[in-house]
Amino acid sequence: MSWIKKLGFLTAFVIPSLTILGFYLGGYWNYLTILFVFIIIPLADYLIGEDPENLSEDESMLIAEQFYYRFITFIWAFFQVAFLIWGVWMIATVPLTVTEWIGFVVSFALVTGGIGITVAHELGHKKSKLERFYAKLLLMTVCYMHFYIEHNRGHHVYVATPRDPATSRKNEAFPKFWVRSVFGSYFSAWRLEKERLRKRKLGIWSFDNQMIWFSLLPIVLCGVLTTGMSLIVGAFTWQVIAFFFAQSILAFTLLELVNYIEHYGIVRKEVAPGRYERVNPMHSWNSNHRLSNFFLFQLQRHSDHHANAIKRYQVLKHYDESPQLPSGYPAMIMLAAIPPLWFKWMNPKLAEWEREVYLTD
C-alpha cells in the first residue's frame, strides 16, 4: 500500500482539529467542521474521484497484520476520551450563545459519531479483547453500547431481511427508519443477550448481563463528568448533562443515517421459510470515493465488509458487481435527510439492482 494511503487514514484527525479551532475562534466559526464535512468533502470526492484499486491476496495478508493501522484506531480511542473531557470542560466554563452552542454540539457529534462510532465499529468486529474493549469505550461516550451486541450478533446475521431493524426498506423515509432502528436495535440487543445468558443457564439479572452494564455505564460516565466539573467550578454544571446527551443523540443519529444509506431497499432472497441466501457483496451499497473513504476508514467499502466482517479496514476490496452509491457518505447523508430527493435519486438505482439480481437468477 502506498504511503499516500497510509497517511490518508490520519485525515480523520482533521475533523476534531477543525472543531477545536472553530470553538476557539468563536461565533460562526463553530460551524467550520459542518462546512468541511458536508461541503468540502463532497466537492473533493467529486473532483478527486473514486479509487477502485484492490490489493493482491499476498499484499492483503501482509498489510492486514501491520500494526500501524491498528495503532491509528487505538490512538483514536484515547483521543476521543480526551476530546470528550475537553468538550465538557469548555461547555462548563465558557459561556456560549445559542448559535455557538448548536454549532459546537453538531460539530462535536461529527467527531464522536462520524469518526468515533466508525472506529468502534471496526474494533468491535475483531477477536482481540483489547480492541473490543476500545470499541465499548468509544460507544460508551455516545450512549450506544448496545450496538456492540446488536451489530455483531444481530445486524450481520439478519441484514437485508425483514428481521433486521437496521436495514432500511424501500420507500421508507429516514425519520420512520430512525425510530425503528434506534428502538428496535436496543430491544433486539436485549433479546440476543437474554438468549446468550439462557444458553449459559444464567438469569437476566446476572452480573454477566452485558445489557445492564451497557445501559448504565453511559449514565455513570455522564454522572462522573458532571460531578467532576461541578466540583471544579463550584456550582452544579447542568450544561454538562445537556451537552453529553445532545452530542450522543446526534452521534448515533449520524450512525443511523449511515445505516440507512448502506442498506436502503436491499433484500436477500428467501430460500426457505425464514431462511435467506448467504450475504454477498451484492447486499450492501458501496462507495469508492477516495477522500471520504480515508476519513471513514474505508467503511464505504461496505459490501466487502458484510461479506467478510472480520477483515480489517485497510484491506477491504471493491467489487464492480456491488450496487454503487453516486457519492460518498457525506453527500448521501444530506440527500437522505430530504426524503423526496433521496427517493428520486435512489429508487431508480435500486430498480437497476433489482433487475440485475432478477436477471442473474
Image: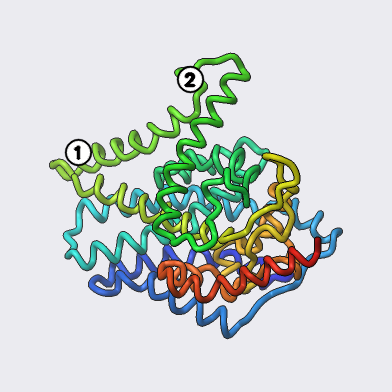
Place residue 91 in its image quadrant: bottom left
Write down the residue under mark 2.
204
**Which mark is on residue 275?**
none
Q: Is residue 111 above or below residue 332?
A: above
Write down the residue under mark 1.
231
Q: Specify whether 309 is left or right of 48.
A: right
Q: Secondary structure at mark 2?
A: loop
For this orientation, the residue located farthest to the bottom is 47
Place residue 236 in its image quadrant: top left
Query: Disc 1 residue type?
Result: Leu
Where's the N terminus, which quadrant?
bottom right
Residue 179 x %, y %: 40, 49
Q: Secondary structure at mark 1?
A: helix
Crowding near the residue tagged with mark 2, few <14, some 14–19, many ≥20 C-alpha atoms within 10 Å: some
Q: Specify whether 346 is left or right of 282.
A: left
Q: Specify whether 201 is left or right of 203.
A: right
Residue 137 x %, y %: 48, 41
Name the mark nearer the viewer: 2 or 1: 2
Alpha-carbon span between mark 2 and mark 1: 37 Å
